[in-house]
Image (cartoon, helix red, strand yellow):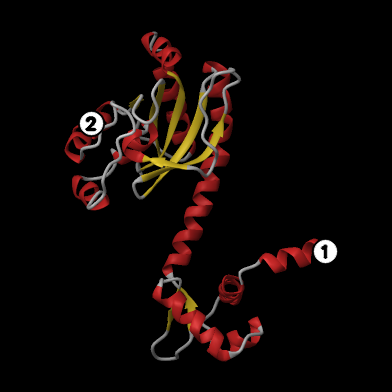
């Protein structure tokens, strides 16, 4: 019964498209249209139509000489990103737990996707009053600690392209909603190697973020802690929280192969 219900909930076109991608991945060599059609048990015209859509989105490519189909570079990019994110999560998880044990504020692991920050892992504080974002959720990069940390790795040209035609939403009086002002902020963040969201997304909430770098020295993720402003400020005044987040981010980076500290 459950299997039948799952099938009834499937979107047919998506299901067929994924079947084609799975066949191309499994075979691992360029395939003729007729062979793909046989493997996925669909008529040639349907397979041809779906392949054309995949080609238009760079998920599949077609050899001009043989007319055979093979997976496009976008598929490899997505696969590598997924594997890399899983690798970062597995390495960072014990460090996140240790960080929360020491400061009892919610710890987040984030990556950048366009002009949004994506939370790929989190360990929550045990406090009654705490901040949390569901794993997989997104937030605006321009007004979050992790988002600004990640944006600081981009060049001025990359920032111009990323925010071309984009209106930065102002969530609180403290939100930086100007690209010019944000660039100034990012230069400071890049220099000091940490960022602060000072009630920029939500009033009463502060976030402190530090960079995580890979073996190539690229800033690939951000480690952050978030909580009520009163608690975060108290911890920052003692310099304990910043030092703790910095040392944790460095430890994760070292495990990822970074060696330039």
Disc 2 is placed on an element classified as helix
CB contact under 8 Å: marks 2 and 1:
no
The picture quadrant where one finds residue 39 is bottom right
**Image quadrant where one finds the C terminus:** top left
Q: Residue at x 54, y 40 (%)?
A: 135
Q: Is residue 200 above or below residue 22?
A: above
Quadrant of the frame with the N terminus? bottom right
Residue at the (36%, 24%) spot, across then down: 199
Q: Can you tell which quarter of the image residue 90 is in?
A: top right
Q: Which residue, given by chain and number where applicable, does mark 1 sit on?
A: 1
Query: 198 above or below 53?
Result: above
Give how far apart the Cα atoms at labels 2 and 1 are: 56 Å
Query: In this figure, which residue is indicated by the disc labeled 2?
Result: 185
Q: Residue at x 28, y 38 (%)?
A: 152
Q: Residue 11, relative to residue 95: is it above or below?
A: below
Extreme residue toward the left, this view? 180
Tell whether 52 sits left or right of 217.
right
């Amino acid at each position: 019964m459950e299997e039948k219900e799952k099938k009834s909930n499937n979107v047919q076109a998506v299901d067929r498209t994924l079947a084609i991608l799975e066949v191309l991945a499994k075979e691992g060599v360029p395939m003729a249209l007729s062979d793909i059609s046989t493997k996925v048990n669909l008529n040639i015209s349907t397979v041809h139509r779906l392949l054309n859509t995949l080609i238009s989105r760079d998920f599949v490519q077609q050899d001009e000489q043989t007319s055979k189909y093979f997976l496009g570079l976008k598929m490899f990019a997505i696969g590598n990103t997924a594997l890399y994110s899983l690798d970062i999560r597995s390495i960072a998880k014990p460090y996140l737990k240790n960080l929360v044990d020491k400061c009892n504020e919610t710890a987040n692991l984030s990556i950048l996707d366009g002009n949004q920050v994506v939370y790929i892992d989190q360990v929550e504080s045990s406090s009654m009053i705490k901040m949390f974002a569901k794993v997989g959720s997104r937030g605006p990069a321009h007004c979050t600690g992790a988002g600004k940390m990640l944006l600081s790795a981009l060049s001025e040209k990359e920032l111009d392209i990323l925010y071309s035609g984009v209106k930065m939403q102002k969530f609180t009086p403290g939100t930086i909603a100007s690209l010019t002002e944000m660039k100034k902020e990012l230069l400071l963040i890049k220099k000091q190697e940490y960022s602060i969201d000072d009630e920029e997304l939500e009033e009463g909430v502060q976030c402190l973020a530090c960079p995580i770098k890979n073996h190539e020295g690229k800033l690939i993720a951000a480690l952050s802690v978030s909580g009520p402003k009163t608690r975060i400020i108290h911890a920052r005044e003692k310099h304990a929280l910043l030092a703790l987040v910095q040392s944790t981010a460095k430890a994760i980076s070292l495990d990822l192969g970074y060696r330039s500290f």
